Image (cartoon, rainbow, N blue to C red):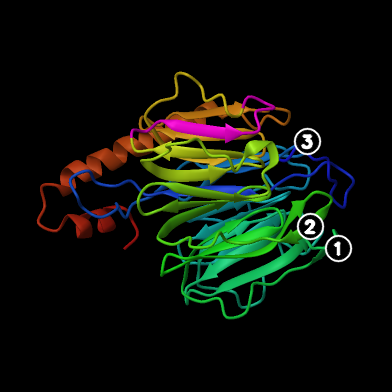
Amino acid sequence: MSTMATRNMRGQERVALGIALHMHRINPNGMKAIHGPAIAIAISLCLSGPSAAKASNLPGTVVAWGDNSTGQRDVPAGLTNAVAIAAGNWHSLGLNTNRTFVAWGDNSKGQTNVPVGLTNVTAIAAGGFYTLVLNADSTVSQWGYIIDSTVQLVPVNAPGGLTNVVALAAGFSHSLALSANSTVTAWGYMPTGPAFVPTYVPPGLTNVVAIAAGYYQSMALKANDTIATWGANISGVTNQPAGLTNVVAIAAASDTCFALKGNRTLVAWGNNSYGLTNVPLQLTNVVAIAAGGNHCLALTADGNVVAWGRNNEGQTNVPVGLMNEIKSLLKREARMLKRAESVKNPDAYLFRRSGRS
């Protein structure tokens, strides 16, 4: 998160959004993504204050660790068969396979008040004090509060006319939407000195395939495997390394950025107050990442979850049993894939065996 000591409405140092990563395992022989249970990891970002980390444990279930000051770690009984999770300031989100949506934790700004009749949700994102969802008709719903140009918390709604959206990203007070035509829309505010100004999208940014938002910075992964980074350049967070290419995934912490390369190594830059840019030397073969305010999680191909950075709330203390369950799940998927290779319709086999039929 930013080194600036802005304060939230509770008088505590700010805590940022949650970023979730939902990873479908891809068949190296060219088949489509396996339709079985995917692995998701999400962490609540923190600068100095509460934080919670979450990860899928058994297929469709969620386990959380870290701070629980507002119940953000108390996963509701209604969250079953989860396919996506997200963590905000002090609130958490979950999406079920039937496209129903669950929110829990801090509700001081109405961020967990799911609108009546909201169904058929396909993606979720959690900001500082707001919630963002993608509907099946490719429109966006948003509620809660953000900081505006008067540096006050005000209600927020998604921009009118925003359609054909395929992905979302949530920062503390700004949001991003990726459209089907590979362009990005941004709204909300970011700091420039003591003032807050509207966020923006760099001129000519096209061919985008993925987006991520940190506290006040934004990231876009382009089809040519390069990235664009923009926004408030706190701690050099928008100064991406020269020659950074072959990027396959991105994640944004408060004022630290991460890029996962095709060779499964991780590159980090920006704020290193808690060693966040010091990627562990033994960390290789990474297949998924999620970034917190001052901590990060990485999933390796063999099922290990590696965490580093600040640990004031136990957010980097990954439960031992979790990794055992992930490894078991990966072995099951490997068996499914091997069996699928011997049948005439492998996609149908995987879908049926995953229990999603």
Residue 218 lies, in percent from the top left, at 59, 52
Q: Main secondary structure of the magenta part?
A: loop
**257, 77: nearer the viewer:** 257
Mark 2 closeness class: few <14, some 14–19, many ≥20 residues within 10 Å: some
Image mark for residue 196:
2
Identified at 85% across, 46% down, the residue is: 7
Residue 210 location, x and y as percent? 45, 55
Please state if 345 lies on the left or on the right of 262 as rendered. Answer: left
- In this picture, which residue range is highlighted in magenta? 263-275
Q: Where does the image place residue 222, in percent across and percent down from the top left?
A: 41, 53
Q: Secondary structure at mark 1?
A: loop
Q: Is residue 274 magenta?
A: yes
Real-space CA distance between mark 2 and mark 1, rounded to the nearest whole angstrom: 7 Å
Closer to the chain start, of discs 3 and 2, is 3
Q: Nearer the viewer, residue 237 or 209?
A: 237
Of residues 246 and 308, the one drawn nearer to the viewer in this rendering: 246
**Residue under pointer 3:** 48
- Camera-nearest label, 3 or 1: 1
Report the residue at 71% width, 62% height from top. 112
Q: Amino acid at mark 2?
A: Phe
Is 347 one of the magenta-colored residues? Answer: no
Amino acid at dot 1: Thr
Q: Residue at x 67, y 26 (%)?
A: 274
Q: Are marks 2 and 1 in contact (CB under 8 Å)?
A: yes
- The earlier-in-sequence mark between 2 and 1 is 1
Cα separation between marks 3 and 2: 21 Å
Asked whether the residues under the numbered discs 3 and 1 touch, taking CB atoms below 8 Å apart as contact, a structural biologist would say no
Q: Which residue is mark 1?
A: 150
Q: Nearer the viewer, mark 3 or mark 2?
A: 2
When the figure is inspected, residue 72 is found, relative to residue 136, above or below; the finding is above
| The C terminus, quarter of image | bottom left
